[in-house]
Image (tube, rainbow, N blue to C red):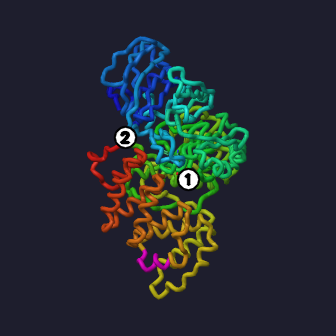
Amino acid sequence: ILSAVTGLNVMSDPCSFSSFTRCVTKHLNLHLHLDFDRHVIRGRVALTVEVLEDRFSTLTLDSSDLSVVSVTANGQPVSLPSSLSVLMAWQHVIVEVTYETSPSATALQWLTPEQTAGKKHPYLFSQCQAHHCRSMIPCQDTPSIKHTYYAQVSVPKDLVTVMSAVRDGQEVDPQDSGRIIYRFRQTVPMPSYLIAIVAGALESREIGPRSRVWSEKEFVDKAAFEFSETEAMLKTAEELAGPYVWGQYDVLVLPPSFPYGGMENPCLTFATPTLLVIAHEISHSWTGNLVTNKTWEHFWVSGVCTFSFHSPVLVISQVNTFGANNPLTNLVPSLQDVNPDDAFSSVPYEKGFALLYHLEEQLGGPEVFMGFVKSYIQRFAYSSVTTEEWKNYLFAYFKDKVDILNKVDWNAWMFTPGMPPVKPQYDTTMADACNALSQRWLQAKDQDLNSFKQSDVKTLSSHQVIEFLSLLLQEDPLPLTHVKKMQEVYDLNAYMNAEIRFRWLRLCVRSRWEEVVPLALKMATDQGRMKFTRPLFREVFNFEKFRDEALRVFLAHRAGMHPVTSGLVSKDLKVDVSNAASQ
Ligand code: BES
């Protein structure tokens, strides 16, 4: 990050150096040239900036690992100080930055042809949330600012590129007939973290009146089938939350190294092929993309309001690698001097879900609460909010129920680490069976093991198997004899559902089952979703005898891993960062 202009700057976003209290970006005009040989993007971005103060002001842009070639303001060259700061002498300024990204830009993963399904062409995808856009574009990289964008992207002609925007035509690159320029427009103001790009040998299929699915051709038909319910889900969401404002809703199915299950990039959700993920990402079209968290400290406000669209999940998972006293387990953590990637966990999802569920119960049930959610969305659409603003609106909307709201221990919910102050009373019928079965295993003596039968799990849904394993993972490790018996009667090794598999493999490694270690490391590297990869590596690393093996496998795969994933696994496995910069 290049900026450190002044201590005078009133910085209300601890994760951004950009001077957004004085100047705000309204629009980005992007020219991007993707260089697959050098793994860099050559870029030129024109930012339309409005100056909020009527005297001279300074614009500071966030940037990470960019090499800046030149800067102009309203066409006049700007000589750069040590930071990307521009003195603004006008009310409206077009600041143009010509730059190049680094091959190790944290927003980008460049895949070699061998890492793709088709094996013939390279592939590039971005992941900007939370604070990585600055490694792709110099910008005011804070969710408190929203702008539109227009982009023209030049790629080799064998490749197709799509962005988080509406497609706006293509032409042969006038400077190089071996390349095509694709154009995109995003006319709805949105935060920088939602800018996204993908390029590869992509194909697409129509799956609805406003939806296509994109992927390498090897997966496109399967994906079209998998996501055929997209339009029905969009319609349901519109009934609940108001009109879908983004025009197109496409889905991109990514290669397995994508570090998340899904990412709600506007007009083009990035996803692994799971319907539940799509339901979640569709709901972000309202909470998150339309009403956005003002800073990453308020992540839960947009991340979790998606709750309103989900049916309640079983039980809150209490497995928490942070530990119950860690301030990062606050619903609203302080991110002063904290990297948002290090702070990210399931806590805001689970605690936020518990809070909203609790409020819903207290205030009169789903219909009443959904009325609030819809009204809140309309009130704050196109803006960014803090937890405080969310809460004030809750009190205003439920002005007749303030006595109920005043009974809520807000400080405990928001600013206290550990488990939520109230354990919501879910319907536990489904969970009871999981609980009973996990208790049987926990209490079983060796001579009881023959009482377990294949039929124990035959009647359980996959959600219940997940819950059963989660409950066991919260306890001390089972004896090795027990997990071996579990494999013998339930054959959990045969389950391909990733949510089941990663929990099962962790359970076995924790019980020191040596033969399972290669399976755990295989799953950790065959795909790269951090939710699976990080705990699997950690689990093997904690098995003393295989610590070196975990490190060896990680180091062997690191160069082909997503930069954020490899960075976080390095930290998890305490790999010396001085020899970790290998990409
Ligand atoms: N926007 C998030 C993913 C994210 C969060 C990326 C923070 C970077 C920083 C996305 O909506 C998400 O939560 N995806 C989940 C899907 C699940 C809840 C169905 C995931 O990736 O696991």
Q: Is residue 559 above or below residue 108?
A: below
- In this orientation, does residue 237 appear? yes
Residue 352 is left or right of residue 549, and the answer is right
Q: Residues within 10 Å of mark 1 (few under 14, many from 20)?
A: many
Spot occupied by residue 524 in the image (x, y as percentages of width and height): 44, 58
Spot occupied by residue 326 in the image (x, y as percentages of width and height): 38, 54
In the orientation shown, which residue stands out farthest toward the bottom? 447
- What mark, if any, has residue 336 been given in the picture? 2
Examine the image and state in which quarter residue 150 appears. Answer: top right
* Mark 1 residue type: Phe
Q: Residues within 10 Å of mark 2 (few under 14, many from 20)?
A: few
For the N terminus, which image quadrant?
top left
Q: Give the Cα distance between marks 2 and 1.
A: 25 Å
Q: Which residue is mark 1?
A: 353
Spot occupied by residue 319 in the image (x, y as percentages of width and height): 45, 61
User: What kind of secondary structure does the magenta stretch mostly adopt?
Assistant: helix
Bounds of the magenta segment: 478-486
SS for dot 2: loop
Q: Residue, x 49% and y 84% (percent of image)?
A: 449
Instruction: State which tag comes first along the sequence, 2 or 1.
Output: 2
374 drawn magenta: no
Q: Is residue 408 above or below residue 385?
A: below
- In this orientation, does residue 412 appear? no
